[in-house]
């Protein structure tokens, strides 16, 4: 048994002969039972036909990079070629297939059956790809090439959430700015950028990557199959768009890297007081301990910063993960290699000029940004309709109406309450808010956020020709003082905090559901102890059932006062008409009323919530709204 090394001179000759582009050089040590010499090009293996004269007996082989001394063939009885061949074949079959990049990068998440590619490849001229005497990949299209890889240590220093997500995307050839599947999976994120980014102060990564081979598509001018082009919806059809993404994914696999990786991911939470240099030193310490000294770190060993709100995650892919020692694990990679990276190209980049591609592009962008479950994607897309607040600003009365009022202290300002009924007809309500109206901003009103048109999923149930019966107003009982809460002092105005919901509807009720289509504020006159209360208008949606309901009084987005681009804030719109001598009273009333916009939108997974109830409340001396949202089965 002797080790035969590929010579540099033979590589250069072969490279000139094949005309292959230059790639990263790595050493290949091949173990054969005979002394015959074999020349293998380092840049790329070419397609050759296997003749009857060539030996087809299995011969154990080891492919590795000389930069890592732990990979060797000390055990000549091991046969990594079987596992390596299987992984390479599966990787080649994945090239050109559809993929949903919100998933972790694994072959099992490829769309369709193995080999069911979305793009045309030269299948007619497929030949055997000869990597060595023992490693032959059958029937490989000529526009697929295989390159050897190198092993290396990689590190991404301490950076922000979005910077790390960008690094992950660039590594996979993704131009999207959203955090995607591999990034979220490695750091144990939820997938919601709105949740994960604010909770993360910094991220870091260090790991060892063993790249045995990379298989990739070499044709830069990929062409989609005609079936895929015909499947693109010509209009904004949520059901068809969701079906396209579910069947074909969002991108096409263009390459796959085979080998193993041993990586440490460090996540510093926003509550952590450690500096960037502290985290950097910590990453260096655990990296040196794990990779250079050959010491194993148990699941609890490195978490000395646990009390400092820092999470450390160890992840391996490829090799035998039961080998806790890093050096010993490295030796097992050749026996059980796995996919450690994939690159992609967007499906829509190959659909230029196809009718409806703009709708598909928008649907995929929304899906990648918010990541609703694929089973909810149709309803999520259906709810991507413009939303407005009622009543419109132009419909507000210029003359100050006569309204009941609330008083919170003996000498404090009065808060008048608009008792106007706000209704929106057959347009689902997605949010509510309290607002201060009038020139003096001293009149409390309620507003409803609703769709400008009816989602397609609701058309069969709620179109104008469908009989739904008369809407019904519901509110609290005037004499039920159990729900009365003082706003400031017990001897002054109170709020009825009774929940308002349609109690005759329950989850799974097949007769239909009732959703909110109107709201009204009112005041019960009990002298100085006036009570503010809320009434809601409910309309029936026949043929639907409630899947799930939640009460949520936390705002989905910053309040209008905190968003400089907000156009819906009543306070902002009326700011030019304010008078200096009323600023004191305005400030006092603003401290009593929470005007935060309360709604659920696409960022609230699964993104198709409707309002089915609400109640007033008092929190820290402020009048607040709490909303009940529901998901429907259509």
Image (cartoon, rainbow, N blue to C red):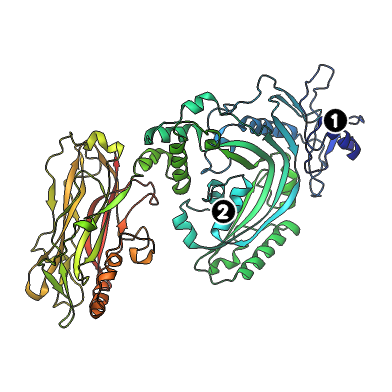
Q: In which quarter of the image is residue 31?
A: top right
Q: Which mark is residue 563?
A: none
Helix, strand or loop for disc 2: helix
Instruction: Please identify the quadrant where the C terminus is shown.
Output: top left
Q: Is residue 195 found left or right of 139 in the rendered image?
A: left
Sequence order check, earlier mark of 2 and 1:
1
Q: Which of marks 2 and 1 is in front?
A: 1
Q: Can residue 238 be seen in this view?
A: yes
Identify the element where label 1 is drawn. helix
- Cβ–Cβ below 8 Å for labels 2 and 1? no
Task: Give residue 17's mark.
Answer: 1
Q: Quadrant of the N terminus?
A: top right
The outermost residue toward the right is 35
The percent position of residue 25, horizontal first and vertical second, equals 81, 43
Q: How crowded is mark 1: few (under 14 residues within 10 Å), some or many (20 or more)?
A: few
Residue located beneath label 2 in the image? 165
Above-or-below relation of 142 to 601: above
Q: In this view, does 18 lie above or below 631?
A: above
Q: Position of residue 346 (x, y in %)?
A: 55, 39
Question: In screen coordinates, is 356 left or right of 550?
Answer: right
Quarter of the view holding residue 333: top right
In the figure, is residue 287 to the left or right of 354?
right
| Residue 40 visible within the image | no
Report whether 265 appears left or right of 373: right
């Amino acid at each position: 048994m002797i080790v035969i090394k590929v010579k540099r001179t033979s590589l250069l000759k072969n490279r000139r002969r094949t005309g292959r582009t230059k790639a990263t050089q790595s050493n290949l040590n091949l173990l054969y039972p005979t002394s015959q010499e074999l020349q293998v090009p380092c840049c790329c293996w070419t397609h050759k036909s296997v003749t009857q004269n060539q030996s087809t007996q299995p011969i154990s082989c080891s492919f590795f990079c000389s930069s890592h001394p732990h990979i060797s063939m000390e055990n000549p009885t091991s046969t990594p070629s079987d596992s390596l061949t299987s992984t390479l074949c599966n990787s080649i079959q994945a090239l050109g297939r559809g993929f949903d990049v919100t998933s972790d990068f694994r072959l099992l998440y490829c769309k369709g059956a193995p080999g069911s590619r979305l793009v045309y490849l030269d299948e007619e001229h497929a030949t055997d790809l000869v990597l060595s005497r023992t490693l032959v990949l059958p029937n490989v299209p000529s526009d697929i090439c295989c390159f050897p890889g190198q092993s290396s240590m990689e590190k991404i220093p301490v950076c922000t959430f979005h910077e790390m997500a960008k690094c992950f995307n660039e590594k996979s050839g993704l131009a999207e700015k959203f955090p995607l599947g591999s990034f979220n999976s490695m750091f144990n994120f939820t997938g919601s950028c709105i949740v994960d980014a604010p909770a993360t102060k910094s991220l870091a990564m260090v790991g060892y990557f063993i790249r045995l081979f990379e298989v990739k598509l070499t044709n830069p001018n990929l062409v989609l199959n005609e079936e895929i082009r015909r499947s693109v919806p010509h209009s904004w059809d949520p059901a068809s768009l969701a079906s396209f993404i579910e069947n074909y994914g969002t991108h096409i696999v263009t390459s796959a890297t085979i080998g193993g990786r041993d990586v440490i991911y460090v996540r510093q939470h926003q509550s952590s007081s450690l500096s960037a240099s502290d985290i950097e030193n910590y990453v260096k310490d655990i990296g040196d301990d794990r990779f250079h000294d050959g010491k194993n770190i148990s699941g609890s060993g490195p978490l000395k910063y646990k009390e400092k709100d820092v999470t450390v995650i160890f992840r391996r892919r490829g090799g035998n993960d039961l080998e806790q020692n890093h050096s010993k694990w490295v030796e097992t990679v050749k026996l059980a290699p796995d996919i450690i990276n994939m690159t992609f190209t967007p499906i829509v980049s190959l659909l230029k000029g196809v009718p409806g591609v703009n709708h598909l592009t928008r649907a995929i962008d929304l899906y990648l940004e918010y990541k609703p479950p694929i089973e909810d994607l149709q309803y999520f897309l259906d709810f991507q309709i413009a939303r407005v607040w009622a009543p419109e600003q132009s419909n507000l009365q210029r003359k100050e109406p006569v309204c009941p009022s609330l008083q919170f202290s003996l000498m404090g300002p009065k808060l008048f309450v608009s008792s106007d009924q706000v209704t929106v007809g057959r347009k689902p309500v997605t949010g509510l808010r309290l607002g201060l109206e009038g020139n003096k901003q001293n009149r409390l009103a309620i507003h409803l956020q609703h769709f400008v048109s009816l989602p397609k999923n609701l058309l069969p149930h709620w179109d104008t020709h469908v009989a739904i019966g008369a809407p019904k107003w519901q509110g609290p009982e005037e004499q039920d003082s159990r729900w009365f809460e003082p706003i400031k002092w017990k001897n002054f105005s109170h709020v009825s905090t009774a929940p308002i919901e349609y109690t005759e509807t329950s989850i799974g009720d097949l007769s239909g559901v009732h959703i909110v289509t109107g709201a009204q504020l009112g005041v019960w006159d009990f002298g100085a102890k006036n009570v503010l209360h809320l009434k809601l208008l409910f309309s029936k949606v026949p043929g639907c059932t409630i899947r799930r309901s939640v009460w949520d009084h936390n705002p989905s987005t910053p309040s209008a006062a905190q968003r400089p681009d907000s156009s819906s804030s009543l306070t902002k719109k009326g700011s030019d008409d304010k008078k200096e001598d009323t600023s004191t009273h305005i400030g006092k009333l603003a401290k009593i009323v929470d005007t935060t916009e309360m709604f659920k939108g696409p960022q609230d997974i699964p993104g198709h919530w409707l309002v089915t109830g609400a109640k007033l409340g008092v929190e820290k001396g402020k009048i607040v709204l709490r909303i009940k949202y529901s998901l429907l089965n259509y």
